[in-house]
Image: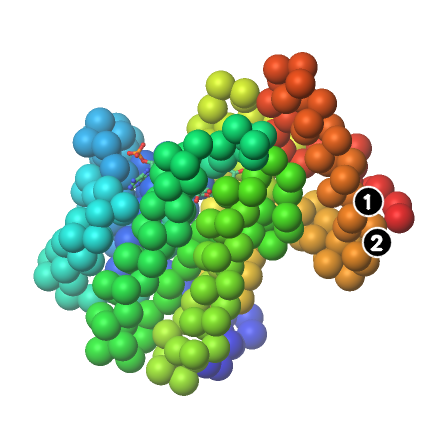
Amino acid sequence: MPAEPEGEIMSDVFAGKIAIVTGGTSGIGYAVSEELLKRGATVWVIGSRQESVEKAKASFTAYTNARFAAVDVTVADQVKGMIDTCVREDGRLDYLFNNAGIGMTHPSGYLTLDMWKKAIDLNLWGVIYGIHYALPVMLAQKSGHIVNTSSIAGILPLPSQAVYCATKYAVSGMTESLRYEFAEAGIVFTSICPANVATAIFGKAGVPKEAIPAEEAARTILDGVAKKEACVILPAFAEQLYERLANDPVLKEKFMLEYARRRNEGWRSGVAYLGIPEDMLDMQR
Ligand SMILES: NC(=O)c1ccc[n+]([C@@H]2O[C@H](COP(=O)([O-])OP(=O)(O)OC[C@H]3O[C@@H](n4cnc5c(N)ncnc54)[C@H](OP(=O)(O)O)[C@@H]3O)[C@@H](O)[C@H]2O)c1
């Protein structure tokens, strides 16, 4: 697939395009939906709960190009219905953002099988269903772009996140493999690997102080998607950290052991240790 021409105005890339954003009612997905709406796309804003969908609807009244639906992405038929409805009403599907997901940072010895299942159903099967039903539509169109939200935990093995890593490494690997397979068919695949974005995902433990606002994350994500990048890692500190660790296995081991030590200590003292702390970023081997 040829890259977008140099110097193209990014805001034009999405104008007039039809997009679906799962998990569009909160956090990163909400901010991506709003940014897409601002850049002129028609956006299907998807949440699983009617209540969150109604709330998003109430806050997006200024946009006539916003559509809304309650869809549980862990249910294959509902995902099929979401894509069928979009194509029936808007004629095509240019972008599918498989973004809905849950976090899971937990001492792995205490995970229940229900926790594994819940995370895999949503973070992995939700993405698989989206790809499965969007691909035939995009292949018939001979164009389309599927954007799957992975995580920094989809490219780095963060301790106490074994179940989350299992889902997100799968999303990253699947997305990259599909990107090469479907390039000649004109379908683009991008994975998004955020770290520390201020959203509800952190729950009662609270947002880490290093977290960036979801609006900033959305602009970075859409700039990368507009350029058809393979993988968008954000914020900048996470991208730099990833590059340092990926290129230095000794440092990576040291970093992960220290991170595990801090998290294990946190569990023992009853304090969840979330996010990637600033003071570990410049660790040397
Ligand atoms: N925030 C971060 O620092 C961070 C870092 C790495 C990766 N991520 C990834 O980014 C994505 C978005 O996370 P976020 O931080 O924006 O979380 P969030 O604010 O908690 O939003 C989650 C969204 O997913 C939706 N959702 C949950 N279960 C669903 C289901 N079964 N079907 C359809 N939608 C469902 C929620 O809608 P309802 O409430 O209506 O269910 C909500 O809109 C996730 O894939 C997450 O793993 C986030």
Q: Residue at x 58, y 47 (%)?
A: 153
Q: Nearer the viewer, residue 114 or 57?
A: 114
Q: Quadrant of residue 119?
A: top left
Q: Nearer the viewer, residue 125 or 203?
A: 125
Q: Provide the residue designation for mark 2.
A: 250
Q: Residue at x 64, y 39 (%)?
A: 159
Residue 181 in the image: state x and y as whole percent: 43, 79
Residue 166 in the image: state x and y as whole percent: 51, 49
Question: In screen coordinates, is 217 left or right of 284?
Answer: left
Q: Nearer the viewer, residue 253 or 50?
A: 253
User: Is the C-beta of the residue carrying label 1 under 8 Å from the nearest atom of ligand 1?
Assistant: no
Cβ atoms at labels 2 and 1 below 8 Å apart? yes
Q: Can residue 65 be seen by looking at this rendering?
A: no
Q: Provide the residue designation for mark 1.
A: 254
Tell me: residue 47, above or below residue 82: above
Tell me: residue 199, above or below residue 18: above
Question: In screen coordinates, is 191 left or right of 271?
Answer: left
Callout 2: helix, strand or loop?
helix
Quadrant of ligand 1 in image? top left
